[in-house]
Image: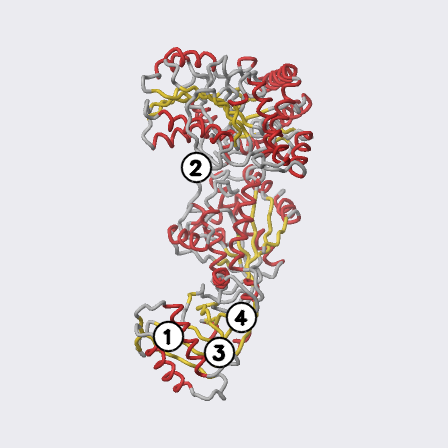
Amino acid sequence: MYRAFLIKYGEIGTKGNNRYLFEDALCRQIRRALKKIDGKFVVSKEQGRIYVECESDFDYDEAVAKLKTVFGILWICPMMQIEDNGFDDLAENTIQYLKDVYRGKEMTFKVKSRRARKNYPLNSMEINTEIGGRILDAIPQMSVDVHKPDIELNIEIRNKINIYSEFIPGPGGMPVGTNGKATLLLSGGIDSPVAGYMIAKRGVIIDAVYFHAPPYTSERARQKVIDLAKLVSVYSGPINLHIVNFTDIQLYIYDQCPHDQLTIIMRRYMMKIAEHFALEEDSLGLITGESIGQVASQTMHSLAVTNEVCTLPVLRPLIGFDKQEIIDIAGKIGTFETSILPFEDCCTIFVAKHPETKPNLKSIKKSELKLREKIDELVKTAIDTVETIWID
Amino acid sequence: MEAYLDNSATTKVLPDVAQLMYKIMTEDYGNPSSMHNKGVDAERYIRQAKENFARILKVSDKEIFFTSGGTESDNLAIIGTALAKQRRGKHIITTAIEHPAVLESFDFLEKHGFEATYLPVNKYGQVEPDALRDALREDTILVSVMYVNNEIGALEPVAELGRIIKEYNKDIVFHVDAVQAFGKFRIYPYKENIDLLTVSSHKIHGPKGVGLIFIKDGTKIHPTAFGGGQQKGMRPGTENVPGIAGMSMAAAAMYEHFDEDVRRLYQLKEFFTERMEQTEGTVINGLTGEKSAPHVVSVSFEGIAKSEVLLHALEDRGIYVSSGSACSSNKPALSGTLKAIGVKRELLSSTLRFSFSVFTTMEELEYTVDVIRELLPVLRKYRPR
């Protein structure tokens, strides 16, 4: 029955003169999402509305599922589309539509028509009254309520006529590509994929950096991160994933620095290397999945010390979230199951039994002096030997 | 150099086997149940395979049933026996060191009202006959013991256990999981009082996804799959003709130079265990020599917090091994066998399994020993403290 969708967007509507940029980005993102499924979809922008029409057969459930991954969409309204064959035909089709969708349930309704084509013989008020009357005659279970109806029956007279009344919630947010790019420090854990999702939701293109430490971390751990990036990319669009071999840096820090500072120093170097790729790729910020106090390296003190190495802003969308709240989002976006696979991350392999929880910047910097001799060279090698994968 | 030392996980398929299977899939692809010639041709492969295994095991071809592999054979043996015998009793016995295909079947039965006894093993991973004697009861219906343990290569006293069971009560069904033993030991179910025997194809250079179960004539066992009546209804479903023919050819090949190959495997094992014993901070788990399986060596490395790290470092040098048992990458819990034989706590997660095949060479083992000796000091230095 449904051949098309009306896409309603939220915040974009408030963007003044830039509005077309947001609308165009949203159209692009819708096209990108629908390209992954069968069907010849046409996405068009018309008078402040976005329409998705399908010129071929398509799988309705699949299309809705895809549209639900496009940031910027507030509501997805599946539409019945008919040719204009006169008012009687419109009324008949409308009644049939209500019968098919609501199957004779007792409900209240209100007709809301729009006439984009002004030469239609009846005006909106007349259409509302006339169609409403015919519905009442044809479906005795339905009654009118103009203030709080169960069904808001929309009729749009354009070249074709659109009939819709269902509103399926979209993911909200803003279309990816409207807000620059940021670089995500992606691990195999629960938090960082969620952090990437949340920043992408605000319209930001995502780049990612993953640190692995073979043989201390395995090929499966690496594959797991690639899988996670793929899951995030369902929402964020393509991700450029940089895989950095961190083993030698990690072992060197292990050799030279106090063990309880290992994690914090390691993270400072991760941030530095991530920032290198961010600047190289025109990213405007870094993204981490940190949340205050979750582990030793995420206390306020630790965050301050880690942050000190960065010049770009570090976005921490989960900073005030409890673990369970993060897990709930991970479950909703489908990354949780993959995140909990038991493959070790390079952050945890050498972790001290009692890591420093209140690191002092001065003393950390003093420890880092011990790395003077070789660290720059090791960092350069890690950057030079990066493996980059385009995830789409 | 590449050294594949994970033959207890799976083995390379013999090229001749792969070729035969290709021919069956593209030319003799009929359904063995079809009336026409194509069906008859396909059925011939099944019949030949049954005769082949009957000859090898010295049993009747009517007692051979093909399955999808070791797991299914174990499941059918245990659950099928329980279903058939539950009115006589609900007590079942196995050991603490079985493969998950057995242990999980027992767990399933326990949840459905059966009572299970898990026999302990000695420090070599062997069941003590007296422990079995003490465990047998009037309502015992099934004893399931593996021929060779997959993690440390322990050889179980199957013949003696079989005798004890049958002396106690000949109605008790004796199931033996011989997945790791078939092709390494000449197994004759009738001589060892075995009623049900599990064999897998991909451990003997055959294809994956196929195995067999020997069901001694007269043994009551209830099918656990239902369908079109193939294999006398014991295991219905269109037979995996290429798989069955492939497994049969692989088994025949193993028996061509049986004694010679096994002797060579023991030599490899002796060489490797000696070198490992001479390496500082290593412990060989279980027995060596002819009281053990010829192809499995379990080594614990002191000062290595996680054997996976050594595993991946070896992999980097072309050497492929397992940590504990191959199934453990799905089940990261600590190995049941190593715990059961009393391996020290700190060594439980520092253990690797090296397993050989007829393709393993002395040079590969020399290379492996050299690489291990080179890696150990580095890995011992970098660990959580």
The Cα atoms of the two marked residues, 4 and 2, are separated by 59 Å
The residue at the far front in this view is B35
Report the mark closest to the observer, 4 or 2: 4
Residue at the spot of label 1: A152
Q: Secondary structure at mark 4?
A: strand
Question: Looking at the picture, which amino acid does disc 1 mark?
Answer: Glu
The Cα atoms of the two marked residues, 4 and 3, are separated by 13 Å
The Cα atoms of the two marked residues, 1 and 3, are separated by 16 Å
Residue at the spot of label 2: A353
Q: Which mark is residue A161?
A: 3
Q: Secondary structure at mark 2?
A: loop
**Label 1 in the same subunit as label 3:** yes
Pinpoint residue A310: horizontal percent, then vertical percent: 54, 56
Chain bearing mark 2: A
Pinpoint residue B281: horizontal percent, then vertical percent: 54, 22
**Label 2 in the same subunit as label 1:** yes
Q: Which mark is residue A53?
A: 4
Of the 4 image quadrants, the one containing the C terminus of chain A is bottom right
**Label 4 in the same subunit as label 3:** yes
The Cα atoms of the two marked residues, 4 and 1, are separated by 21 Å
